[in-house]
Amino acid sequence: MSPKTPPGQTRNQIFHYVRKRLLNGMPPTVRDVQRAFGFRSVQTAREHLEGLVSQGKLQKEPGVARGYRLAQADLEQPRLIPLLGRVQAGQLTTAIEDPDGYLAVQSRDEADELFGLTVRGQSMSEAGILPGDTVIVRRQPDAESGDIVVALVEDEATVKRLRKHQGRIELHPENPSFEPIVPNPDELTLLGKVIEVRRYLESRSK
């Protein structure tokens, strides 16, 4: 950690580090924070953590080495994520920077790890994902076989069930009227895993 980093910025970085560890089920110790930020003393790390407690960003369970917890308000805070339409090849970052709008979501993931995508087509109807639905996607470069994912095949984003078979990735529909997609590896980019589906009963254009 550079000694020229403003104290408030350092503390904010520590908060995001601790928050990510807590949400991943790996509460850090004070020494973990010391090592992660290169502090010379444990006391410096402790002072930053206690400062976050004083600010109401963290809670501390007395007498517990890994006793820092997120404040309840943080867990309940809605996050605004970008709502995308069609995603062109290689332009996910650009699309997120110029979205069609934003959605408020309740999630333990950071807002910059999520995006929404409007579903087109009937290929996932038997999984309860219909045209016009919005899927909330967590950005990740891989997923487990059986997960519902958003993948980019050439220049089209598609929502499908991921299957891994003999070292090959297949994208399966949930509608017998559609055929599985078996893309060449160089034509496929996994954009993320679908973690939520939303349906609007009234037109959002009203």
Image: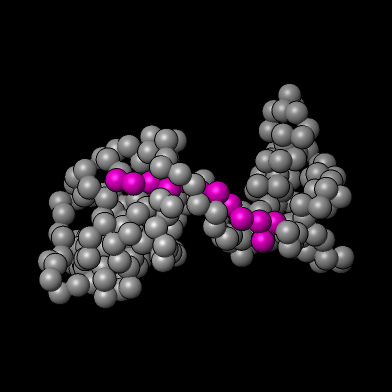
Residue 123 vs residue 150, the one in the foreground: 123
Residue 68 visible at all? yes
Image-quadrant location for residue 120: bottom left
So how many labels did they put on this image? 0
Above or below residue 186? Residue 6 is above
Above or below residue 105? Residue 39 is above
Above or below residue 69? Residue 95 is above
Q: Residue at x 83, y 48 (%)?
A: 55
Horizontal side of 31 relative to 55 (left or right) equals: left
Question: Which quadrant of the rendered structure holds the N terminus?
Answer: top right
Horizontal side of 113 relative to 94 (left or right) equals: right
Magenta span includes 126: no
Residue 164 visible at all? no
Horizontal side of 98 relative to 161 (left or right) equals: right
Q: Position of residue 41 (x, y in %)?
A: 81, 42
Q: Residue at x 43, y 48 (%)?
A: 83
Image-quadrant location for residue 60: bottom right
Tell me the colour scheme of the image.
one colour
Q: Position of residue 80 (x, y in %)?
A: 55, 49
Image-quadrant location for residue 107: bottom right
* Residue bounds of the magenta highlight: 74-86
Q: Position of residue 27 (x, y in %)?
A: 68, 61
Q: Position of residue 40 (x, y in %)?
A: 78, 38
